[in-house]
Amino acid sequence: MKFLAVFCFLVTSIIVISCSRKSSPTATVAKTSYATSVNSIMQAKCTPCHIPAAGGKKLALDTYTAVKTNIDDIIRRVQLAPTEKGYMPMKHDPLPEAEIALLKKWQAEGAAE
Ligand code: HEC
């Protein structure tokens, strides 16, 4: 009887583990979203000029809709050389590669909120 119980427990465990393994790849791929990745870049790098709450008077980039609408232009501008016309963030160091990559990933994945 004891053997049977242990056997059943093992079989159940194996089934549970193999099932959960199958679903894990989709669950572990982190999808970007405005709330989790993009907003913090805008708040940190485009402030104060584009952040009305910080006194910004330029195009407001503090909302999901505004950033989504302008993402093509944003990605284009942050990849310009600091000396080129239209470069952003104006008068600041260029965005690190990782942040530019994140903006591109967000756009490519459909710009989730
Ligand atoms: C020091 C102030 C300053 C910072 C910081 C700054 N900008 Fe700008 N931005 C401006 C000014 C001034 C303009 C208008 C002149 C122009 O179009 O080049 C502008 C224009 C823009 C435009 C075009 C807006 C329009 O009305 O067509 C976009 C898009 C933009 N910035 C994106 C960004 C992004 C993204 C960041 C952060 C990574 C950023 N900017 C950081 C000052 C700033």
Image (spheres, rainbow, N blue to C red):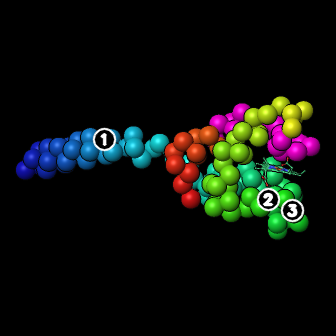
Residue 45 x, y percent position in the rendering? 80, 49
Would residue 12 be found to the left or right of residue 107 on screen? left
Q: Earlier in the sequence, mark 3 or mark 1?
A: 1
Viewer-proximal residue, 69 or 54?
69
Is ligand 1 closer than 8 angstroms to the Cβ of mark 3?
yes
Q: CA distance from mark 3 to mark 1?
A: 48 Å
Q: Earlier in the sequence, mark 1 or mark 2?
A: 1
Residue 87 x, y percent position in the rendering? 83, 40
Q: Amino acid at mark 3?
A: Gly
Q: Which residues are magenta?
A: 86-102
Report the disc number at residue 56.
3
- The answer to whether marks 3 and 2 mark residues whose Cβ atoms lie closer than 8 Å is no
Q: Amino acid at mark 1?
A: Lys
Q: Amino acid at mark 2?
A: Leu
Badge 3 marks a residue whose secondary structure is: loop
The residue that appears at 66% across and 48% down in the rendered structure is 71
Q: Residue furthest front?
A: 85
- The answer to whether marks 1 and 2 mark residues whose Cβ atoms lie closer than 8 Å is no
Residue 24 appearing in the image: yes
Residue 67 x, y percent position in the rendering? 67, 55
Q: Is residue 85 above or below residue 54?
A: above
Viewer-proximal residue, 59 or 26?
59
Badge 2 marks a residue whose secondary structure is: loop
Q: CA distance from mark 3 to mark 2?
A: 8 Å
- The answer to whether marks 3 and 1 mark residues whose Cβ atoms lie closer than 8 Å is no
68 magenta-colored: no
**Residue occupied by mark 2:** 59
- Graded by Cα atoms within 10 Å as few (under 14), some (14 to 19) or many (20 or more), the crowding at tag 2 reads few
**Residue occupied by mark 1:** 22
